[in-house]
Amino acid sequence: MRSHLSGRALHGVHRSPHRRRATTAGFAALFLTAGTLASGPAHADELPLSEMVTAEAIEAHLVNLNTIAEYNGGNRATNTPGYDVAALYVEDQLERAGYEPYRHEYEYEAWRTLTPTVLARTTPEKTSYEEGEHFETMSYSGSGSVRGAKVTAVATDTAESGCLPEQFADFPEGHIALVKRGSCPFGEKVQNAADAGASAALVYNNEDELFTGTVGTESDVPAIGVSGALGEELNASTRHLRLKVEVDASITTESSYSILADTPGGKDDNVVVVGGHLDSVEDGPGINDNGSGTAFLLETARQLAAQGEDPNNKVRFAFWGTEESGLVGSTEYVEGLSEQELDDLALYLNFDMIGSNNYGRFVLDGRMELPGSVGAPSGSGAIAKVFEDYFEEQGQVSEPGELSGRSDYLAFMVAGIPSGGLFSGGDGTKTEEQAEWYGGEAGKTFDPYYHTPDDNLENINWDSVAELSAAGAHGVEFLAETTLPVNGVVPFSAPAEVEPLRKGDAWLR
Ligand code: DTR
Ligand code: ZN
Ligand code: ZN
Protein backbone atom coordinates (compact mmCIF):
# COMPACT_ATOMS: atom_id res chain seq x y z
CA MET A 1 0.00 0.00 0.00
CA ARG A 2 2.87 2.33 0.85
CA SER A 3 4.07 2.37 -2.72
CA HIS A 4 0.79 3.95 -3.76
CA LEU A 5 1.33 6.94 -1.59
CA SER A 6 2.86 10.05 -2.93
CA GLY A 7 4.35 12.52 -0.47
CA ARG A 8 1.27 14.63 -0.99
CA ALA A 9 -0.95 11.83 0.10
CA LEU A 10 0.10 12.16 3.71
CA HIS A 11 -1.44 14.83 5.73
CA GLY A 12 -0.38 16.49 8.89
CA VAL A 13 2.72 14.51 9.77
CA HIS A 14 4.66 17.56 10.83
CA ARG A 15 1.79 19.70 11.98
CA SER A 16 1.23 20.91 15.49
CA PRO A 17 -1.55 19.11 17.34
CA HIS A 18 -5.13 20.14 17.86
CA ARG A 19 -5.89 23.84 17.89
CA ARG A 20 -9.39 25.31 18.24
CA ARG A 21 -10.41 26.79 14.95
CA ALA A 22 -11.15 30.47 14.65
CA THR A 23 -14.92 30.71 14.66
CA THR A 24 -15.63 34.01 13.03
CA ALA A 25 -16.85 32.87 9.67
CA GLY A 26 -19.73 35.18 8.92
CA PHE A 27 -21.36 35.27 5.54
CA ALA A 28 -19.35 38.28 4.41
CA ALA A 29 -16.13 36.54 5.31
CA LEU A 30 -17.24 33.62 3.22
CA PHE A 31 -17.24 35.74 0.12
CA LEU A 32 -14.39 38.04 0.87
CA THR A 33 -11.63 35.67 1.83
CA ALA A 34 -9.83 34.92 -1.37
CA GLY A 35 -8.45 31.42 -1.74
CA THR A 36 -9.38 30.01 1.64
CA LEU A 37 -12.90 29.24 2.65
CA ALA A 38 -14.29 30.11 5.98
CA SER A 39 -15.82 27.01 7.48
CA GLY A 40 -16.56 27.53 11.15
CA PRO A 41 -20.04 27.81 12.57
CA ALA A 42 -22.08 30.79 11.47
CA HIS A 43 -22.02 32.37 14.90
CA ALA A 44 -19.03 32.91 17.14
CA ASP A 45 -20.86 31.74 20.25
CA GLU A 46 -21.51 28.28 18.83
CA LEU A 47 -19.25 25.28 19.04
CA PRO A 48 -18.23 23.79 15.71
CA LEU A 49 -20.19 20.65 14.79
CA SER A 50 -16.97 18.65 15.14
CA GLU A 51 -17.08 19.38 18.87
CA MET A 52 -20.83 18.99 19.27
CA VAL A 53 -20.73 15.45 17.87
CA THR A 54 -19.03 13.54 20.68
CA ALA A 55 -17.75 9.98 20.92
CA GLU A 56 -19.81 9.60 24.11
CA ALA A 57 -23.07 10.32 22.31
CA ILE A 58 -22.09 7.99 19.48
CA GLU A 59 -21.34 5.33 22.07
CA ALA A 60 -24.83 5.74 23.52
CA HIS A 61 -26.35 5.08 20.08
CA LEU A 62 -24.09 2.07 19.64
CA VAL A 63 -25.13 0.64 23.01
CA ASN A 64 -28.74 0.97 21.87
CA LEU A 65 -28.11 -0.65 18.49
CA ASN A 66 -26.29 -3.47 20.28
CA THR A 67 -29.23 -4.03 22.63
CA ILE A 68 -31.57 -4.09 19.65
CA ALA A 69 -29.43 -6.72 17.93
CA GLU A 70 -29.01 -8.76 21.11
CA TYR A 71 -32.76 -9.10 21.65
CA ASN A 72 -33.57 -9.71 17.99
CA GLY A 73 -31.56 -12.70 16.92
CA GLY A 74 -28.10 -11.20 17.32
CA ASN A 75 -28.01 -9.07 14.17
CA ARG A 76 -29.57 -6.21 12.23
CA ALA A 77 -29.42 -7.83 8.82
CA THR A 78 -31.75 -6.86 5.99
CA ASN A 79 -35.26 -8.26 6.28
CA THR A 80 -34.91 -9.26 9.94
CA PRO A 81 -36.58 -8.00 13.13
CA GLY A 82 -33.21 -6.56 14.16
CA TYR A 83 -33.23 -4.32 11.09
CA ASP A 84 -36.82 -3.22 11.63
CA VAL A 85 -36.27 -2.30 15.27
CA ALA A 86 -33.02 -0.49 14.46
CA ALA A 87 -34.97 1.44 11.81
CA LEU A 88 -37.60 2.41 14.40
CA TYR A 89 -34.81 3.60 16.68
CA VAL A 90 -33.30 5.76 13.95
CA GLU A 91 -36.72 7.21 13.05
CA ASP A 92 -37.59 7.93 16.68
CA GLN A 93 -34.28 9.68 17.30
CA LEU A 94 -34.71 11.76 14.15
CA GLU A 95 -38.29 12.70 15.00
CA ARG A 96 -37.30 13.79 18.49
CA ALA A 97 -34.71 16.07 16.90
CA GLY A 98 -37.40 17.64 14.72
CA TYR A 99 -36.88 15.74 11.47
CA GLU A 100 -39.58 14.04 9.44
CA PRO A 101 -37.90 10.81 8.38
CA TYR A 102 -39.30 8.90 5.40
CA ARG A 103 -38.77 5.41 4.06
CA HIS A 104 -37.59 4.55 0.58
CA GLU A 105 -38.88 1.08 -0.20
CA TYR A 106 -37.53 -1.27 -2.82
CA GLU A 107 -37.52 -4.89 -3.87
CA TYR A 108 -34.49 -7.04 -4.44
CA GLU A 109 -33.55 -10.58 -5.28
CA ALA A 110 -32.35 -12.21 -2.08
CA TRP A 111 -30.10 -15.23 -2.29
CA ARG A 112 -30.24 -17.55 0.73
CA THR A 113 -29.06 -21.05 1.56
CA LEU A 114 -31.94 -23.29 2.61
CA THR A 115 -29.84 -26.04 4.19
CA PRO A 116 -26.22 -25.87 5.34
CA THR A 117 -23.66 -26.24 2.59
CA VAL A 118 -21.56 -29.40 2.64
CA LEU A 119 -17.92 -29.63 1.63
CA ALA A 120 -16.31 -32.94 2.52
CA ARG A 121 -13.50 -35.20 1.42
CA THR A 122 -14.72 -38.68 0.58
CA THR A 123 -11.32 -40.07 -0.50
CA PRO A 124 -8.57 -40.74 0.62
CA GLU A 125 -9.99 -40.35 4.10
CA LYS A 126 -13.46 -39.06 4.99
CA THR A 127 -13.32 -35.53 6.43
CA SER A 128 -16.04 -32.91 6.77
CA TYR A 129 -14.92 -29.33 6.43
CA GLU A 130 -16.54 -26.60 8.53
CA GLU A 131 -18.43 -23.68 7.05
CA GLY A 132 -17.06 -20.50 8.63
CA GLU A 133 -13.71 -22.12 9.30
CA HIS A 134 -12.61 -23.86 6.11
CA PHE A 135 -15.08 -22.51 3.59
CA GLU A 136 -17.96 -20.12 2.88
CA THR A 137 -20.65 -20.55 0.29
CA MET A 138 -20.25 -17.73 -2.18
CA SER A 139 -23.25 -15.42 -2.40
CA TYR A 140 -25.37 -16.21 -5.45
CA SER A 141 -23.82 -19.66 -5.71
CA GLY A 142 -25.88 -22.01 -7.84
CA SER A 143 -27.35 -25.10 -6.19
CA GLY A 144 -26.25 -28.65 -6.80
CA SER A 145 -25.03 -31.84 -5.28
CA VAL A 146 -21.81 -33.59 -6.29
CA ARG A 147 -20.55 -36.72 -4.60
CA GLY A 148 -17.14 -38.34 -4.94
CA ALA A 149 -16.07 -36.02 -7.75
CA LYS A 150 -12.45 -35.62 -8.81
CA VAL A 151 -10.75 -32.28 -8.49
CA THR A 152 -8.75 -30.51 -11.19
CA ALA A 153 -6.64 -27.47 -10.32
CA VAL A 154 -6.71 -24.73 -12.94
CA ALA A 155 -3.55 -22.63 -13.39
CA THR A 156 -3.24 -22.27 -9.61
CA ASP A 157 0.44 -21.42 -10.00
CA THR A 158 -0.45 -18.26 -11.95
CA ALA A 159 -1.88 -14.94 -10.81
CA GLU A 160 -4.81 -15.37 -13.21
CA SER A 161 -6.02 -18.77 -12.08
CA GLY A 162 -9.35 -19.48 -13.76
CA CYS A 163 -9.66 -16.09 -15.44
CA LEU A 164 -8.93 -17.30 -18.98
CA PRO A 165 -11.24 -19.77 -20.77
CA GLU A 166 -8.19 -21.39 -22.45
CA GLN A 167 -6.92 -22.48 -19.03
CA PHE A 168 -9.86 -24.90 -19.06
CA ALA A 169 -9.05 -26.34 -22.52
CA ASP A 170 -8.49 -29.90 -21.27
CA PHE A 171 -10.79 -29.69 -18.30
CA PRO A 172 -12.38 -33.10 -17.59
CA GLU A 173 -16.18 -32.97 -17.64
CA GLY A 174 -17.75 -33.31 -14.21
CA HIS A 175 -14.63 -32.56 -12.22
CA ILE A 176 -14.65 -29.92 -9.51
CA ALA A 177 -12.55 -26.94 -10.56
CA LEU A 178 -10.05 -25.66 -8.01
CA VAL A 179 -8.94 -22.09 -8.73
CA LYS A 180 -7.06 -19.48 -6.74
CA ARG A 181 -8.30 -15.99 -5.86
CA GLY A 182 -6.91 -13.05 -7.86
CA SER A 183 -6.92 -10.89 -11.04
CA CYS A 184 -10.57 -11.21 -12.09
CA PRO A 185 -13.96 -11.36 -10.35
CA PHE A 186 -14.98 -14.63 -8.66
CA GLY A 187 -18.00 -14.79 -10.96
CA GLU A 188 -15.76 -14.98 -14.03
CA LYS A 189 -13.69 -17.86 -12.66
CA VAL A 190 -16.81 -19.78 -11.70
CA GLN A 191 -18.49 -19.11 -15.06
CA ASN A 192 -15.39 -20.28 -16.96
CA ALA A 193 -15.41 -23.46 -14.87
CA ALA A 194 -19.11 -24.06 -15.46
CA ASP A 195 -18.71 -23.43 -19.22
CA ALA A 196 -15.94 -26.02 -19.30
CA GLY A 197 -18.22 -28.64 -17.74
CA ALA A 198 -17.11 -28.43 -14.12
CA SER A 199 -19.63 -29.75 -11.60
CA ALA A 200 -18.63 -27.17 -8.96
CA ALA A 201 -15.98 -24.52 -8.41
CA LEU A 202 -13.80 -23.97 -5.36
CA VAL A 203 -12.01 -20.62 -5.18
CA TYR A 204 -9.30 -20.56 -2.55
CA ASN A 205 -7.84 -17.51 -0.87
CA ASN A 206 -4.40 -16.09 -1.66
CA GLU A 207 -3.86 -15.66 2.08
CA ASP A 208 -4.20 -18.37 4.73
CA GLU A 209 -7.55 -17.35 6.12
CA LEU A 210 -11.10 -17.54 4.87
CA PHE A 211 -12.92 -14.87 2.87
CA THR A 212 -16.47 -14.10 1.87
CA GLY A 213 -17.17 -13.59 -1.78
CA THR A 214 -19.96 -13.27 -4.27
CA VAL A 215 -20.32 -14.52 -7.81
CA GLY A 216 -22.53 -11.49 -8.55
CA THR A 217 -25.33 -13.23 -10.40
CA GLU A 218 -26.44 -16.80 -9.81
CA SER A 219 -23.84 -19.24 -11.09
CA ASP A 220 -24.65 -22.42 -12.99
CA VAL A 221 -22.74 -24.59 -10.53
CA PRO A 222 -22.06 -24.53 -6.76
CA ALA A 223 -19.40 -21.90 -5.95
CA ILE A 224 -17.49 -22.17 -2.70
CA GLY A 225 -14.81 -19.91 -1.25
CA VAL A 226 -12.11 -21.87 0.57
CA SER A 227 -9.49 -20.71 3.07
CA GLY A 228 -5.98 -20.35 1.70
CA ALA A 229 -4.80 -23.05 4.09
CA LEU A 230 -7.29 -25.67 2.92
CA GLY A 231 -6.96 -24.54 -0.70
CA GLU A 232 -3.20 -25.13 -0.70
CA GLU A 233 -3.72 -28.52 0.93
CA LEU A 234 -6.24 -29.57 -1.73
CA ASN A 235 -4.07 -28.14 -4.50
CA ALA A 236 -1.15 -30.27 -3.34
CA SER A 237 -3.14 -33.50 -3.34
CA THR A 238 -5.61 -33.45 -6.22
CA ARG A 239 -4.48 -36.80 -7.55
CA HIS A 240 -6.34 -39.12 -5.23
CA LEU A 241 -8.78 -36.59 -3.96
CA ARG A 242 -12.56 -37.02 -4.16
CA LEU A 243 -14.92 -34.42 -2.76
CA LYS A 244 -18.56 -34.03 -1.92
CA VAL A 245 -20.16 -30.64 -2.48
CA GLU A 246 -23.76 -29.71 -1.72
CA VAL A 247 -25.28 -26.27 -2.04
CA ASP A 248 -29.01 -25.80 -1.52
CA ALA A 249 -29.88 -22.16 -2.12
CA SER A 250 -32.69 -20.17 -3.65
CA ILE A 251 -33.38 -16.68 -4.84
CA THR A 252 -36.58 -14.97 -3.79
CA THR A 253 -37.93 -11.47 -4.15
CA GLU A 254 -37.85 -9.57 -0.85
CA SER A 255 -38.50 -5.99 0.05
CA SER A 256 -36.81 -3.61 2.44
CA TYR A 257 -36.27 0.12 2.87
CA SER A 258 -33.78 2.87 3.56
CA ILE A 259 -34.55 5.79 5.87
CA LEU A 260 -33.97 9.37 4.80
CA ALA A 261 -34.40 12.69 6.59
CA ASP A 262 -33.84 16.22 5.31
CA THR A 263 -33.07 19.37 7.22
CA PRO A 264 -36.19 21.49 6.83
CA GLY A 265 -34.20 24.45 5.53
CA GLY A 266 -31.30 24.91 3.15
CA LYS A 267 -31.09 25.19 -0.63
CA ASP A 268 -33.10 22.27 -1.96
CA ASP A 269 -31.41 22.49 -5.34
CA ASN A 270 -27.98 21.93 -3.81
CA VAL A 271 -28.51 19.02 -1.45
CA VAL A 272 -25.65 17.51 0.53
CA VAL A 273 -26.42 13.79 1.02
CA VAL A 274 -24.73 12.16 4.00
CA GLY A 275 -25.19 8.41 4.23
CA GLY A 276 -24.15 5.05 5.56
CA HIS A 277 -25.78 1.65 5.76
CA LEU A 278 -28.06 0.60 8.57
CA ASP A 279 -28.06 -3.14 7.90
CA SER A 280 -25.50 -5.51 9.37
CA VAL A 281 -24.39 -8.91 8.14
CA GLU A 282 -26.27 -11.91 9.54
CA ASP A 283 -23.26 -13.10 11.48
CA GLY A 284 -23.31 -10.44 14.18
CA PRO A 285 -24.58 -7.13 15.57
CA GLY A 286 -22.42 -5.06 13.18
CA ILE A 287 -21.40 -2.46 15.71
CA ASN A 288 -18.48 -1.17 13.67
CA ASP A 289 -20.00 -2.26 10.34
CA ASN A 290 -22.02 -0.19 10.26
CA GLY A 291 -23.39 0.73 13.65
CA SER A 292 -20.55 3.23 13.84
CA GLY A 293 -21.56 5.08 10.67
CA THR A 294 -25.24 4.90 11.64
CA ALA A 295 -24.54 6.34 15.11
CA PHE A 296 -22.37 9.06 13.58
CA LEU A 297 -25.13 10.05 11.14
CA LEU A 298 -27.75 10.11 13.86
CA GLU A 299 -25.69 12.23 16.20
CA THR A 300 -24.66 14.59 13.42
CA ALA A 301 -28.31 15.01 12.43
CA ARG A 302 -29.25 15.70 16.05
CA GLN A 303 -26.49 18.24 16.61
CA LEU A 304 -27.08 19.97 13.29
CA ALA A 305 -30.68 20.43 14.38
CA ALA A 306 -29.55 21.58 17.82
CA GLN A 307 -27.65 24.44 16.21
CA GLY A 308 -31.08 25.86 15.52
CA GLU A 309 -30.08 27.53 12.25
CA ASP A 310 -30.90 26.41 8.75
CA PRO A 311 -27.82 25.31 6.89
CA ASN A 312 -27.23 27.11 3.59
CA ASN A 313 -27.55 23.82 1.71
CA LYS A 314 -30.16 21.24 2.54
CA VAL A 315 -28.61 18.22 4.24
CA ARG A 316 -30.19 14.82 3.60
CA PHE A 317 -29.25 12.02 5.98
CA ALA A 318 -29.57 8.54 4.49
CA PHE A 319 -29.56 5.26 6.39
CA TRP A 320 -29.26 2.71 3.61
CA GLY A 321 -30.80 -0.74 3.67
CA THR A 322 -29.46 -3.97 2.17
CA GLU A 323 -25.89 -2.74 1.62
CA GLU A 324 -24.47 -6.06 2.69
CA SER A 325 -26.28 -7.92 -0.09
CA GLY A 326 -25.07 -5.78 -2.96
CA LEU A 327 -25.41 -2.04 -2.12
CA VAL A 328 -29.12 -2.38 -2.85
CA GLY A 329 -30.74 0.47 -0.88
CA SER A 330 -28.42 3.20 -2.12
CA THR A 331 -28.46 1.92 -5.69
CA GLU A 332 -32.25 1.69 -5.79
CA TYR A 333 -32.48 5.21 -4.39
CA VAL A 334 -30.10 6.79 -6.88
CA GLU A 335 -31.51 4.87 -9.83
CA GLY A 336 -35.01 5.96 -8.83
CA LEU A 337 -34.20 9.68 -8.94
CA SER A 338 -35.41 11.79 -11.84
CA GLU A 339 -32.86 13.81 -13.78
CA GLN A 340 -34.03 16.94 -11.98
CA GLU A 341 -33.69 15.30 -8.55
CA LEU A 342 -30.21 14.07 -9.42
CA ASP A 343 -29.29 17.50 -10.63
CA ASP A 344 -30.34 18.92 -7.27
CA LEU A 345 -27.77 16.80 -5.44
CA ALA A 346 -24.53 18.64 -4.74
CA LEU A 347 -22.49 15.74 -3.43
CA TYR A 348 -22.49 12.54 -1.40
CA LEU A 349 -20.56 11.69 1.80
CA ASN A 350 -20.28 8.07 2.96
CA PHE A 351 -19.65 6.76 6.45
CA ASP A 352 -19.22 3.00 6.55
CA MET A 353 -17.04 1.80 9.49
CA ILE A 354 -15.44 4.53 11.57
CA GLY A 355 -14.52 2.53 14.71
CA SER A 356 -12.25 -0.24 13.42
CA ASN A 357 -10.29 -1.95 16.19
CA ASN A 358 -6.88 -1.59 14.52
CA TYR A 359 -7.88 1.57 12.69
CA GLY A 360 -6.46 3.92 10.12
CA ARG A 361 -7.70 7.33 8.98
CA PHE A 362 -8.78 6.81 5.39
CA VAL A 363 -10.21 9.65 3.36
CA LEU A 364 -11.99 8.24 0.31
CA ASP A 365 -9.67 8.83 -2.60
CA GLY A 366 -11.43 11.60 -4.53
CA ARG A 367 -8.18 12.62 -6.19
CA MET A 368 -7.77 9.07 -7.53
CA GLU A 369 -4.26 8.63 -6.20
CA LEU A 370 -4.55 4.89 -5.71
CA PRO A 371 -4.52 2.61 -8.75
CA GLY A 372 -7.50 0.60 -7.48
CA SER A 373 -9.80 3.60 -7.19
CA VAL A 374 -12.78 3.63 -9.53
CA GLY A 375 -13.69 6.83 -11.39
CA ALA A 376 -14.58 9.71 -9.10
CA PRO A 377 -16.46 12.67 -10.61
CA SER A 378 -14.75 16.07 -10.54
CA GLY A 379 -15.24 17.72 -7.18
CA SER A 380 -14.57 14.49 -5.31
CA GLY A 381 -10.98 15.60 -4.76
CA ALA A 382 -12.23 18.82 -3.16
CA ILE A 383 -14.36 16.78 -0.76
CA ALA A 384 -11.28 14.75 0.19
CA LYS A 385 -9.38 17.97 0.84
CA VAL A 386 -12.01 19.15 3.32
CA PHE A 387 -11.38 16.05 5.44
CA GLU A 388 -7.61 16.03 4.90
CA ASP A 389 -7.29 19.65 5.95
CA TYR A 390 -9.20 18.92 9.13
CA PHE A 391 -7.00 15.97 10.05
CA GLU A 392 -3.96 18.05 9.27
CA GLU A 393 -5.20 20.80 11.56
CA GLN A 394 -5.53 18.23 14.32
CA GLY A 395 -1.98 16.99 13.75
CA GLN A 396 -3.37 13.65 12.61
CA VAL A 397 -2.02 11.72 9.65
CA SER A 398 -4.57 10.59 7.10
CA GLU A 399 -4.21 8.83 3.79
CA PRO A 400 -6.37 8.12 0.76
CA GLY A 401 -8.73 5.17 1.11
CA GLU A 402 -9.26 3.21 -2.08
CA LEU A 403 -12.49 4.00 -3.88
CA SER A 404 -13.03 0.32 -4.50
CA GLY A 405 -16.75 0.70 -5.10
CA ARG A 406 -17.45 -1.55 -2.13
CA SER A 407 -19.81 0.80 -0.32
CA ASP A 408 -22.85 2.99 -0.91
CA TYR A 409 -20.99 5.84 -2.59
CA LEU A 410 -20.74 3.71 -5.73
CA ALA A 411 -24.20 4.49 -7.09
CA PHE A 412 -23.64 8.22 -6.54
CA MET A 413 -20.32 8.18 -8.33
CA VAL A 414 -21.75 6.22 -11.21
CA ALA A 415 -24.47 8.88 -11.46
CA GLY A 416 -21.80 11.59 -11.65
CA ILE A 417 -22.30 12.99 -8.14
CA PRO A 418 -19.01 14.08 -6.48
CA SER A 419 -18.46 11.70 -3.58
CA GLY A 420 -16.23 11.18 -0.59
CA GLY A 421 -16.25 9.98 2.97
CA LEU A 422 -14.27 8.42 5.74
CA PHE A 423 -13.34 4.83 6.55
CA SER A 424 -11.29 3.36 9.40
CA GLY A 425 -10.27 0.21 7.51
CA GLY A 426 -11.70 -3.27 7.04
CA ASP A 427 -10.12 -6.42 5.73
CA GLY A 428 -6.87 -4.80 4.54
CA THR A 429 -3.66 -5.40 6.50
CA LYS A 430 -1.90 -2.62 8.44
CA THR A 431 1.70 -1.95 7.40
CA GLU A 432 4.58 -1.07 9.75
CA GLU A 433 4.40 2.49 8.55
CA GLN A 434 0.67 2.70 9.19
CA ALA A 435 1.24 1.34 12.70
CA GLU A 436 3.62 4.26 13.25
CA TRP A 437 1.01 6.73 12.04
CA TYR A 438 -2.02 5.33 13.80
CA GLY A 439 -0.73 3.03 16.53
CA GLY A 440 -2.20 -0.46 16.61
CA GLU A 441 -0.62 -3.59 15.21
CA ALA A 442 1.17 -4.03 11.90
CA GLY A 443 0.53 -7.27 10.07
CA LYS A 444 -3.04 -7.45 11.38
CA THR A 445 -6.15 -6.38 9.50
CA PHE A 446 -7.66 -2.98 10.34
CA ASP A 447 -10.79 -4.67 11.63
CA PRO A 448 -10.06 -8.24 12.73
CA TYR A 449 -13.75 -8.58 13.70
CA TYR A 450 -15.08 -7.47 10.31
CA HIS A 451 -18.22 -9.48 9.42
CA THR A 452 -17.88 -11.72 12.50
CA PRO A 453 -20.08 -12.23 15.59
CA ASP A 454 -17.41 -10.28 17.49
CA ASP A 455 -18.06 -7.02 15.67
CA ASN A 456 -19.42 -5.81 19.02
CA LEU A 457 -19.12 -2.94 21.51
CA GLU A 458 -16.01 -4.41 23.10
CA ASN A 459 -14.05 -4.31 19.87
CA ILE A 460 -14.77 -0.75 18.89
CA ASN A 461 -11.78 1.57 18.94
CA TRP A 462 -13.09 4.72 20.61
CA ASP A 463 -10.15 6.86 19.49
CA SER A 464 -11.08 5.96 15.94
CA VAL A 465 -14.71 6.92 16.60
CA ALA A 466 -13.68 10.23 18.20
CA GLU A 467 -11.23 11.22 15.46
CA LEU A 468 -13.23 10.14 12.43
CA SER A 469 -16.53 11.46 13.75
CA ALA A 470 -14.99 14.87 14.47
CA ALA A 471 -13.55 15.01 10.95
CA GLY A 472 -16.85 13.76 9.54
CA ALA A 473 -18.90 16.35 11.41
CA HIS A 474 -16.51 19.04 10.25
CA GLY A 475 -17.00 17.92 6.66
CA VAL A 476 -20.78 18.00 7.00
CA GLU A 477 -20.70 21.47 8.54
CA PHE A 478 -18.29 22.85 5.95
CA LEU A 479 -20.25 21.48 2.99
CA ALA A 480 -23.64 22.39 4.45
CA GLU A 481 -22.37 25.94 4.46
CA THR A 482 -20.87 25.92 0.97
CA THR A 483 -20.15 23.43 -1.80
CA LEU A 484 -18.33 26.03 -3.90
CA PRO A 485 -15.08 24.05 -4.16
CA VAL A 486 -16.97 20.89 -5.12
CA ASN A 487 -19.58 22.04 -7.64
CA GLY A 488 -19.08 25.79 -8.00
CA VAL A 489 -22.30 26.70 -6.21
CA VAL A 490 -22.21 29.59 -3.74
CA PRO A 491 -24.94 29.76 -1.12
CA PHE A 492 -26.74 32.84 -2.45
CA SER A 493 -27.92 33.77 -5.89
CA ALA A 494 -26.78 37.38 -5.72
CA PRO A 495 -23.12 38.11 -6.34
CA ALA A 496 -21.13 38.93 -3.23
CA GLU A 497 -21.14 42.52 -2.15
CA VAL A 498 -17.53 43.53 -2.04
CA GLU A 499 -16.80 46.33 0.37
CA PRO A 500 -14.42 48.84 -1.16
CA LEU A 501 -11.10 49.03 0.62
CA ARG A 502 -10.74 52.09 2.83
CA LYS A 503 -7.72 53.69 4.33
CA GLY A 504 -8.66 56.14 7.04
CA ASP A 505 -11.31 58.40 5.53
CA ALA A 506 -9.89 58.44 2.07
CA TRP A 507 -11.16 56.09 -0.65
CA LEU A 508 -8.34 54.21 -2.22
CA ARG A 509 -7.91 54.79 -5.95
N1 DTR B 1 -18.68 -1.96 2.32
C1 DTR B 1 -18.12 -2.41 3.55
C2 DTR B 1 -16.68 -2.66 3.64
C3 DTR B 1 -15.76 -1.80 2.85
C4 DTR B 1 -14.79 -2.25 2.07
N2 DTR B 1 -14.12 -1.22 1.48
C5 DTR B 1 -14.66 -0.08 1.89
C6 DTR B 1 -14.32 1.24 1.58
C7 DTR B 1 -15.07 2.25 2.13
C8 DTR B 1 -16.12 1.95 3.00
C9 DTR B 1 -16.43 0.63 3.32
C10 DTR B 1 -15.72 -0.39 2.76
C11 DTR B 1 -19.01 -3.45 4.16
O1 DTR B 1 -20.10 -3.04 4.49
O2 DTR B 1 -18.69 -4.63 4.33
ZN1 ZN C 1 -20.02 -5.20 5.78
ZN1 ZN D 1 -20.25 -1.68 5.80
Image (cartoon, helix red, strand yellow):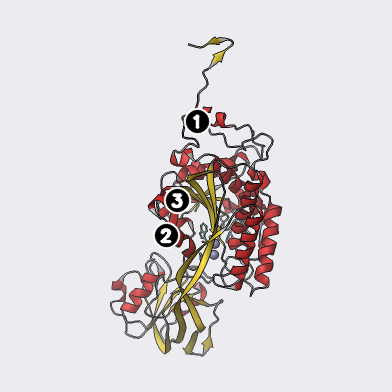
Question: N-terminal of the two: label 1 or label 3?
Answer: 1
Q: Nearer the viewer, residue 145 or 250?
A: 250
Question: In the rendering, at what x and y percent does residue 144 appear?
Answer: 42, 85
- Name above or below for residue 13 compared with residue 228: above
Q: Is residue 473 above or below residue 42?
A: below
In the picture shown, does residue 138 fall above or below 147? above
Q: Amino acid at mark 3?
A: Leu
Residue visible at 67% across and 59% down in the picture: 61
Beta carbon at label 1 within 8 Å of ligand 1 = no
Do the residues bearing badges 1 and 3 touch, measured as CB atoms within 8 Å?
no
Query: Image quarter for residue 167?
Result: bottom left
Which quadrant of the render holds ligand 2? bottom right
Tag in front: 1 or 3: 1
Residue annotated with mark 2 = 336
Where 496 sits versus 146, above or below? above
- How much space separates mark 1 and mark 3, taking CA atoms? 27 Å
Tell me the distance, in whole angstroms, between the alpha carbons under discs 1 and 2. 37 Å
Residue 140 in the image, given as x and y percentages of width and height: 44, 75
Residue 370: mark: 3
Callout 2: few (<14), some (14-19), or many (20+) C-alpha neighbours within 10 Å? few
The local secondary structure at tag 3 comes to loop
Report which residue position mark 1 lands on. 35
Q: Is residue 364 visible?
A: no
For marks 1 and 2, the one nearer the N-term is 1
Question: Do callouts 1 and 2 mark residues in contact (Cβ within 8 Å)?
Answer: no
Left or right: 359 as drawn, with respect to 216 = right
Please identify the residue farthest to the top as the structure is shown: 506
Q: Label 2: state its secondary structure.
A: loop
